[in-house]
Image (tube, helix red, strand yellow):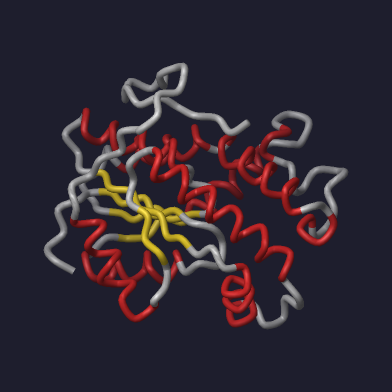
Amino acid sequence: MPKRTWELVLLGGASGVGKSVAAARIAGATGAFVVEFDDVVAAVQELTTAEQHPALHHFDGPTAPERPEDTWPPERVLELQIATAEALEPAALGVVRNRLTVPVPAVVEGDYLTPAVCARAVALGRSTGRDVRAVFLHEGDADRIAANYAAREPAGGDQTGRAEVGARYSHWLADEARRYALPVVDCRPWSTLADRLDAALDAAPSGTPHAAPDAAAADGTGVPSRRAP
């Protein structure tokens, strides 16, 4: 990896595609540290209830099954996953704002980082003179994701339903990232992933949406926000 110029990297992608390993490698090569957005998600959910903030509790509310991906249609699980990610956008932007107050490089990685909020983060960095980058890892093969789960969580049993949702979510993230002019890096071939990810991070940040949604974001970045239907 060439010499780091960025101050903050947002690394998005579906569960099971290798974000944690990639984030650890980037951090190790550049002296940054890793922020797990999943930890923030857990904290926010712990502080709220399904009654207070239903959009954050689709998968742990009183009517949710233990394994939604094995009970609900994948289209329904995907819809709720996107809705949850969008409900968490203010928390993600809060993490970015906080990281930009300190001169310590960091890599924020997580399943629930949306391209919309990443584009706003890049624009926020630009408006404050800070170099923020965002990149999304993509794996659209459900069988490959299932194999990754099996290797990572051998006691988890069959996870084909979860992997199917993950592949669909990965496609959605990739499509949205391209709409917001953010780089998308295919996870395979694994042998060249590190080099391709480095190249994406070393490219000049963009984060300007190709499409123009109706309303601009109210966070001072000038980048419109987009909601899934």
Looking at the image, residue 69 lies above or below residue 90: below
Q: Where is residue 136 in the image (x, y as percent from the top left)?
A: 40, 54
Residue 117 as seen in the image, left or right of residue 82: left
The residue depicted at 32 percent of the width and 22 percent of the height is 222
User: What is the number of callouts on the image?
Assistant: 0
Q: Position of residue 57 (x, y in %)?
A: 72, 41
The residue depicted at 46 percent of the width and 60 percent of the height is 138
Q: Position of residue 118 (x, y in %)?
A: 39, 41
Residue 121 as seen in the image, left or right of residue 160: left
Q: Which residue lies furthest to the right in this view?
A: 63
Question: Which image quarter is the N terminus in?
Answer: bottom left
178 or 46, which lies in front? 178
The residue depicted at 36 percent of the width and 50 percent of the height is 10
The residue depicted at 12 percent of the width and 63 percent of the height is 3
Residue 91 as seen in the image, left or right of residue 190: right
77 or 178, which lies in front? 178
Question: Which image quarter is the C terminus in?
Answer: top right
- In the picture, residue 142 is in which quadrant? bottom right
43 or 210, which lies in front? 210
Looking at the image, residue 140 lies above or below residue 184: below
Residue 182 as seen in the image, left or right of residue 41: left
Looking at the image, residue 94 lies above or below residue 25: above
- In the picture, residue 143 is in which quadrant? bottom right
Q: Residue furthest left?
A: 3
Q: Position of residue 148 (x, y in %)?
A: 57, 76
